[in-house]
Image (cartoon, rainbow, N blue to C red):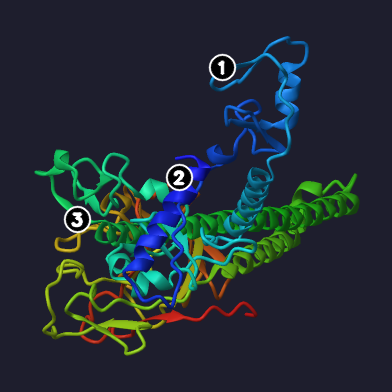
Amino acid sequence: MNVIASICAAERLSHKQVKHSKPKFKLNIVFPLSEENFSCSICLEVFTSPGTLPCGHNFCKACITTRWDGDVQYPCPVCQRLFYTRPELQVNTFISEMAAQFKKSQQVRVECVEHGEVPCDVCTGTKQKALKSCLECPASYCDTHLEPHHRVPGLRRHKLIHPVHNLEDRVCKKHRRPLELFCKTEHTCVCHCESDHKFHPVVPVEVEYGAKKAQLGKTESEVEQMIQERQRRTEEINLSVKLSREDADREEASGAQVFTALMLSIEKCQAEHKSRPSFAGTLRRALDPLAEALNMEMEKLLEAELKSLQQHDVDLTLDPDTANLYLILSEDGKQVHHADTWKEVPDNPERFSKCVSVLTKQSFSSGRFYFEVQVKEKNNWALGVARESINRKDGITASPEDGCWTIWLTNGNEYKALSAASLLLSLRAKPQKVGVFVDHDEGLVSFYDVESRAHIYSFTGCTFKEPLYPFFSPGVNDGGKNSAPLIISPVNQTH
C-alpha cells in the first residue's frame, strides 16, 4: 500500500466509523507507514526534494537529474516510460513534507528506543510514549489516541497488549491475525486460524511468557549465585596466596634469625677454645649453651608459626544430629563428654552409631581453617577432621583409610597418629590444649600443643575430594576417670 492509498483508506474507514457514531468526535485511524513508502527507488533513501514525473512516480530531484545526464531520451526508472523531452521537475511539496515528517518521526522513534520506550504511531510532531499496542490495527497508541479503543464497539474487541517494538512480528503474516497462541510442539507463536497446529498442544502466549519469565528469573538467580560463588572463591584464593606469601616471608626471616644465632654461637665457641689441648673435653660443655640457644630460637620460630596459623581460626558448633547416643553436648554446642547411659534420639543417617564421636555443623571445602580444643584432665580422646562420607554406622579406625585424619590419646599417656599404621608420638609435655590446622588445597592437617608452642604431628600430601568436618571423640567415661569434656576454646592470639 503506497502513501496515497494508505491515507485514502484511513479517511474512508474514518468516515464510515463516524457515520454510525455520535457526531461529537472525529475518529483517526492511521496505518503505520514504513520507510519504503518514502524511499527514492534510485538512492533507496528517504526522499530529499522529491519530484514527480508525468507518469506519477517520485524520485529525489538530484537522483533523477544525475540519472538522465547525457541522455537524449528520458525513461522513468520504475515503469520505463520514455519522455523525448526532458521533463522539468518541480519539488512535490506534499511528498516532501510527508517525507520530512517521516524522518522526524523516525528520529523520535530512535530516541524512544534509546530510552526503552515505544512511541505512539499516531502522534505528529513530538511523539508521546505509547500506553498500549493493538495487535489488530497493528499500531501503538499513547493515552490520547488510545481513547477510541475504549469507546468504539468495533475497536473495543481489538487485542491490546503492553507497548512493544516491532509490532509486525506479533502478527501472523499468513492470516494477518494476532499471534496469541504458543505451540509447545513447534516452539513457535501461532494465530487462532493456523490449522497446521490443530493437534498440537497450545497455550496462550501470556501463559507461556509467564512460565518462560519465571524460568529465566530462576536461571538468572542461579547464574548470579554462580558468579558470586566464583568471585568468593577467587577472593579466597587471592587471600590464601597473599597469606602464604606473608607466612613464607615470616618463616624465612625467622629461619634466617635462627641460623644467624647458631653461627654466632659456633664462632664464639671456636674463638674461646682455639689451640687449647683440652678442646675435645670442653667441647661438650660449650655445646650445652649452644643447644639451649638453638632450642630458644626454635621455640620462637614455632611461636611465630602458630600465631600465623591462628589467623585462620573459625567458629565451630557441635552438631547434635551426628552425636553418638552416649554423648552429651552442652547447650552452646562447644562441649562434649561421654555418659554411662544413652539417650533416646532418632537414628538418622548422619549419627555415629558405634563410634563415640561427633562432627561440627560447619564443613570446609577449600582454603585454610584452624581451631583449638581443651583436652586437660582427660586420659582418652581423639581429634582431627573427617570427610563427609565417613562411615557413621560401623566401627572405624579413625585413620585416613576410613576418611579420618586424627591423633589419639590412650591410657593416659600414649599419643598416636592414626596413619596407615598407628604411629606412637613422643611429646615433651602432656598437651592441655590442642590446635588443629587444615589446608584443604595443600592436603595438610597439622596438630600443635598450644600451651608449649610445640608441633605434635602433621599429615601431608593428603587428597581431599569432599568437604571436611572437624571430628571429636571424648572417649568413654571410664567410671568417671575420663569424665572431663572436650571443649572448643576461643583462640587467644596474645598468649
Residue 228 place in picture, x, y as percent: 50, 60
Image quadrant containing the C terminus? bottom right
Inter-mark Cα distance, 2 to 1: 88 Å
Q: In this image, 478 relative to 5: left or right?
A: left
The residue shown at (58%, 30%) is 57
The residue shown at (48%, 71%) is 371
Query: Which residue corresponds to mark 1?
Result: 80
Q: Would you say the residues marked 2 and 3 are in contact, meaning their CB atoms lie under 8 Å apart?
A: no
The answer to which of marks 2 and 3 sits earlier in the sequence is 3
The residue shown at (65%, 48%) is 103
484 up-or-down from 433: above or below: below
Q: Which mark is residue 411?
A: none
- For the residue labelled by badge 3, is the local secondary structure a helix, a strand or a loop? strand
Query: Which residue corresponds to mark 3?
Result: 203
Q: Residues within 10 Å of mark 2 (few under 14, many from 20)?
A: few
Q: Amino acid at mark 1?
A: Gln
Residue in the foreground of this view, choosing between 66 and 475: 66
Query: Which residue corresponds to mark 2?
Result: 461
